[in-house]
Amino acid sequence: DQQVKQNSPSLSVQEGRISILNCDYTNSMFDYFLWYKKYPAEGPTFLISISSIKDKNEDGRFTVFLNKSAKHLSLHIVPSQPGDSAVYFCATEGTAGGFKTIFGAGTRLFVKA
Amino acid sequence: NAGVTQTPKFRILKIGQSMTLQCTQDMNHNYMYWYRQDPGMGLKLIYYSVGAGITDKGEVPNGYNVSRSTTEDFPLRLELAAPSQTSVYFCASSYTPGLAGGREQYFGPGTRLTVT
């Protein structure tokens, strides 16, 4: 039973355009959401996070949106760059998981030059 | 700061052998974690620790053991290796969740383990 779902295994975007990566979760008790980025042969690195008391958080080219009623969050990258090509993991944590982070399966983003 | 370091980077084990994956962090984080990542899957939590001397099971603990004698080190022990344990293993650390500061985890580069 997947509590965090990233339904798109891969996404291809042209350089300079917007990349939108989506994530759905099942448990309304999750109160903190994170995105991690992973390059091949490296560990994941933290990208951006959002608390459930907010619906948007921005950091440079990266914006995360949270829709609590739909149990959905998305990561927007504008403009996309070839260096953004990586696997992006959505992760959630909160009292439902006892502060144990639950990861989605990841979406592989390809940004074409 | 070196962050989170893991050794070895790669290892091939025969069925039934044992080994220890090493993990060290120099950020004085209380929380440490071990994950495994199978192809096409997200990270699954194996064990975690909230401080020296305290460990607890995650989602997939069977076949593994951990110890946490110091804040810095969190080794993962595989006893009687099986092909199902072929995976990439990541160690991570974080500040105490819920307190001031970010809740993000800092990951090591991973250990790629093959059991044949």
Image (cartoon, coloured by chain):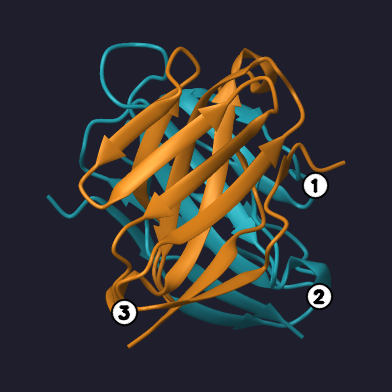
Chain colours: A orange, B cyan
Number of residues whose C-alpha sits closer than 10 Å to that of mark 3, classed few (under 14), some (14–19) or many (20 or more): some
Query: At 38% across and 65% down in the image, what residue appears?
Result: B109
Q: Tag 1, which chain?
A: B
**Relative to A72, is B19 above or below?**
below
Between the residue at mark 3 and the residue at mark 1, the CA separation in whole angstroms equals 40 Å
Task: Pick the residue in front: A66 or B22.
Answer: A66
Vertically, is A45 above or below A95?
A: below
Taking the spot 74% from the left edge, 43% from the top edge, the residue there is B61
Residue B2: image location, x then y, percent = 17, 55
Give the residue type that dot 1 points to.
Asn
Specify the amino acid type for callout 2.
Pro
Give residue B114's position: percent from left, percent from top: 66, 80
Report the residue at 62% width, 39% height from top.
B47
Would residue B68 be seen by someone viewing this image from the given angle?
no
Residue linked to disc 2: B83
Q: How many marks?
A: 3
Is residue A20 shown to the viewer in this render? yes
Give the structural element (helix, strand or loop) at label 2: helix
Residue A16 in percent (x, y) is at 30, 72
Q: Residue at x 31, y 79 (%)?
A: A82
Task: Inspect the image, locate mark 3, and give the three-letter code of the amino acid beneath it.
Answer: Pro
Determine the secondary structure under disc 1.
Answer: loop
Query: Marks 3 and 1: which is nearer the front?
Result: 3
Q: Which residue is mark 1?
A: B62
**Compared with residue B10, is residue A51 higher up or lower down, i.e. above or below?**
above
Q: Earlier in the sequence, mark 2 or mark 1?
A: 1
Residue in front for this viewpoint, B14 or A79:
A79
Which chain does tag 2 point to?
B
The Cα–Cα distance between marks 3 and 2, rounded to whole angstroms, is 36 Å
Q: Provide the residue designation for mark 3.
A: A82
Q: Is residue A110 left or right of residue B87?
A: left
The answer to whether mark 3 and mark 1 are in CB contact below 8 A is no
